[in-house]
Image (cartoon, rainbow, N blue to C red):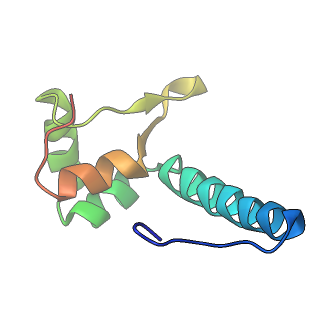
Amino acid sequence: MEGTIVMFKNIDEIKEFARTIVEELRHSELEDGKLLTAKEAAKMLGVSVSTLYRYEANHNINSVALEGGAKRYRQCDVRFLSRGKKII
């Protein structure tokens, strides 16, 4: 919607437009905040799980520690790394 001019006839149209935008943002935040297992993250990157762990050891990606010691990887971080960018 970048570069688009939107004209509203009344306040109800503005409210509906705002609700739509908020819903789209919530959906994208949920998607980006999704946590992946090492197997899922490695599959998205097209590498083995051991390579994913090496990336983590080399500080190319961060994991999220869960209770009990399990690790998860943020989907947005995996996408970022898949585009060839190091996560700091």
32 versus 60 height, above or below: below
Q: Residue at x 16, y 36 (%)?
A: 60
Residue 78 is left or right of residue 26, and the answer is left
Quarter placement of the C terminus: top left
11 versus 34 height, above or below: below
In percent of width and height, residue 29 lies at 56, 50
In percent of width and height, residue 4 lies at 47, 72
Q: How many marks?
A: 0
In percent of width and height, residue 41 lies at 34, 55
Nearer to us in this view, 7 or 29: 7
Nearer to us in this view, 69 or 12: 12
87 versus 15 height, above or below: above
Residue 52 is left or right of residue 12, and the answer is left
69 versus 17 height, above or below: above
Q: Residue furthest right?
A: 12
Q: Residue at x 39, y 60 (%)?
A: 40
Nearer to us in this view, 17 or 84: 17
Residue 62 is left or right of residue 23, and the answer is left
Q: Residue at x 85, y 69 (%)?
A: 10
